[in-house]
Amino acid sequence: MEVDLLLLMANLIFEVSYPVNLDTFFDNYAHNVQKVDKRVEEYAKDPNEENIHDIRTAIRRLEASYMSSPKKLQKKKIKKYVGISKCLFKLNSEIRDFDIILEKLSNEGQISEQQLEPIKKSLEREKDKKLGKALSIATDLKKINVPHPVKDNSLYKHNKTEKKLSRKYNKIVNGFASRIEKNLPLVISDCEKIDELHEIRKDSKKLRYLLELLLSDGDRRKENVDKKARLSGNKGDDIYGVSCLIGALENIQDMLGVIHDYDVTIAYLKKHHTYEHNDAENNITVIRKNKYEQFIQYCKSDLLKSDDGFFLNKYR
């Protein structure tokens, strides 16, 4: 029997409550802080495309750790560190968009060198401005002593903190799952729901990073997680089905990320070049449509696991 595509999120919201292991959470939290510190150093030395990607990913994972932690762990120093990191993330997202627009127009817009040149100069000027601000923020971030979450060794306080963590964590996870559940039918039925597509992409990414906080090094290294497990399965297993869901969310995130890149390029052409680049806009729009159809196919076909009862084909 096939199960509803949205049952993945429905189970997450109504049937699964993850008992978060405090020690595993702390280990991942500390690792995510250290990762941002390392990536900032690399980014400040060379803000190339790879380092921009790495710093953005590291900041997202740190944000997932911070937002789901109990208030007693959200100390002033870590709050400041996360706040500055988010500013750096925002600027690098804009910098990345400039690179994406130029790449799409150069490779897929079928635009002449003569037409491309003024666009390239304009994008590079804007990028240089944003990059200067971003490097300044990165310098400020490097000046902060890297904060670390501190565990209380008292068994009573440990257990109390773990319960608070589990409650807050599950509330946040359920919130993101609920938003995906709300928006997914909208984007499947209407290719023009650009804002909703963008929100699903962001929510999928945030939910994925939250779920990663449940996995210990042993889970990742020894592949202890049953990758074919269903979320509605044995709830006695603390991380039952998590790996499978992380994989599905990563696929959704990647596919919608590609679509978002085309949407950013189309929006730029509409705003800055209303008439002289209609052919380029049409070319990009056609490719975007094909990518959207691939995403719909993934939702209607590839995501279906009729052999193990994971999804129901509701949208065929």
Image (cartoon, grey):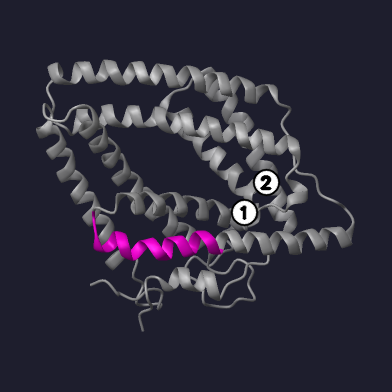
The quadrant of the picture occupied by the C terminus is bottom left
Numbered badge on residue 29: 2
Residue range (magenta): 174-191
Mark 2 and mark 1: span between their CA atoms? Answer: 8 Å
Q: Inspect this view and state whether residue 41 appears.
A: yes
Q: Circle 1 sits in a helix, a strand or a loop, which is it? A: loop
Question: Percent x, y for residue 313?
Answer: 30, 74
Q: Inspect this view and state whether residue 20 appears.
A: no
Q: Is residue 187 magenta?
A: yes
Residue that badge 1 annotates:
213
**Residue that appears at 81% across and 49% down:** 151
The quadrant of the picture occupied by the N terminus is bottom left
Q: Circle 2 sits in a helix, a strand or a loop, which is it? A: helix
Q: Nearer the viewer, residue 57 or 114?
A: 114
**Residue that appears at 59% across and 44% down:** 63
Query: Counting other residues with Cα less than 10 Å from the Cα at mark 2, is it few (<14), some (14-19), or many (20 or more)?
Result: many
**Residue that appears at 54% across and 18% down:** 45
Mark 1 residue type: Leu
Compared across the picture, whether 110 is left or right of 149 comes to left
Which picture quadrant has residue 162?
A: bottom right
Question: Percent x, y for residue 168?
Answer: 66, 60
Query: Counting other residues with Cα less than 10 Å from the Cα at mark 1, is it few (<14), some (14-19), or many (20 or more)?
Result: many
Q: Is residue 14 magenta?
A: no
Residue 239 lies, with reference to residue 105, above or below; the image says below
Which picture quadrant has residue 42?
A: top right
Which picture quadrant has residue 266?
A: top left
Q: Earlier in the sequence, mark 2 or mark 1?
A: 2
Compared across the picture, whether 301 is left or right of 29 comes to left
Q: Are marks 2 and 1 in contact (CB under 8 Å)?
A: yes
Dominant secondary structure of the residues highlighted in magenta in the image: helix
